[in-house]
Amino acid sequence: MSERKVLNKYYPPDFDPAKIPKLKLPKDRQYVVRLMAPFNMRCKTCGEYIYKGKKFNARKETVMNELYMGLPIFRFYIKCTRCLAEITFKTDPENTDYAMEHGATRNFQAEKLIEEEEKRVVQEREEEELNNPMKVLENRTKDSKMEMEVLENLQELKELNQRQAQVDFEGMIDRYRDQEKRDKEREKEEDERETKEMLDRALVKRLRDSDSDSEREEESSSSESKKPSTDKPTDILTTVKPAESQGTSAGGVKKAKVESWERSVGTLGSGALGSLVVRKKPAAAVNKPRPVAAAAAPTSQTDSKASTADSNNASKPVTTQNGSSSLSLLGAYSDSDSE
């Protein structure tokens, strides 16, 4: 089996290379090559930035009539990634670099410009010294003066370093650590003190609240004890109310309040039942007959108060309409029987 990747080819004995025709290609022909952008650039047409290392399919050609020490110079054609404008640059073997030619501007050439400026200054100085001996003396004087200044600055830096070397950095670090430790302890003590004060204030407030609650409970218990306790719901009917709660009549005379059970029995007035009320005879005139008055004469205010007290003591008191002293039905009947 023959080899797939042939490295050596067979040439027959009668092979004559002069019989092979040569291709006549132009010297400025172009080749398509794959390359990366050698530097950062910016397109002049659209302003697009093309960074160093971006890959392009470029066209390569040999620059005619340009050589550097027998080395050919090549030109490359690329297209902008945004507007497809053509950008060209070529090799620069003299500076081992690439030179921008058309379609874009090179960025970040500050270092290159500085180097070029230094080279130009050195070249001018050499040309001046070559034809002017006084200029050589001036340049040497300037150089010596500059060297003296540099040495003085170097000596100052050495002395400064020596002074700094005598500083005890370990002691400074230890003092800093001690200060930091003291600050932390002080902060901790302040926090504990603030916490204790807050707890004390909360405790005092709680004690005050408990004292106020106990005082309120005592006041409520005392007010409850002052209230009359009723064993039965019907006891309120038999309780005697003070005279202040009783109303006053139209003439300013106080009248006893009529209870609900008195309203059910009725009152003895100047009607049909008024004839049943009789006046008790005095002891001196027992034999003299006395007609029964239809209505009792009005008495003084003291008699009315006494009659009111007697009526309260009676089992079922009844008041008359004209404000006189009242008697119970049973008392009236007993008086009439005795006469």
Image (cartoon, helix red, strand yellow):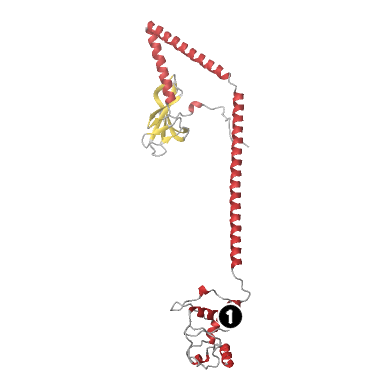
Q: Position of residue 318 (x, y in %)?
A: 53, 85
204 left or right, relative to 122: right
Amino acid under label 1?
Asn
**110 above or below 150?**
below
Q: Secondary structure at mark 1?
A: helix
Which residue sits furthest top?
133
Which residue sits furthest left?
45
The quadrant the N terminus occupies is top right
Q: Position of residue 301 (x, y in %)?
A: 48, 78
Residue, x 62% and y 76% (percent of image)? 232
Q: Position of residue 169 (x, y in %)?
A: 59, 23
Residue, x 40% and y 33% (percent of image)? 42
- Look at the image and tell me whether residue 73 can be seen: no
Residue, x 59% and y 30% (percent of image)? 179
Query: Looking at the image, which is closer to me, 135 or 89?
Result: 135
The quadrant the C terminus occupies is bottom right
Q: Residues within 10 Å of mark 1 (few under 14, many from 20)?
A: few
Q: Position of residue 262 (x, y in %)?
A: 54, 84
49 left or right, relative to 193: left
- Look at the image and tell me whether residue 19 can be seen: yes
Judging by the rendered image, the residue that carries numbered circle 1 is 313
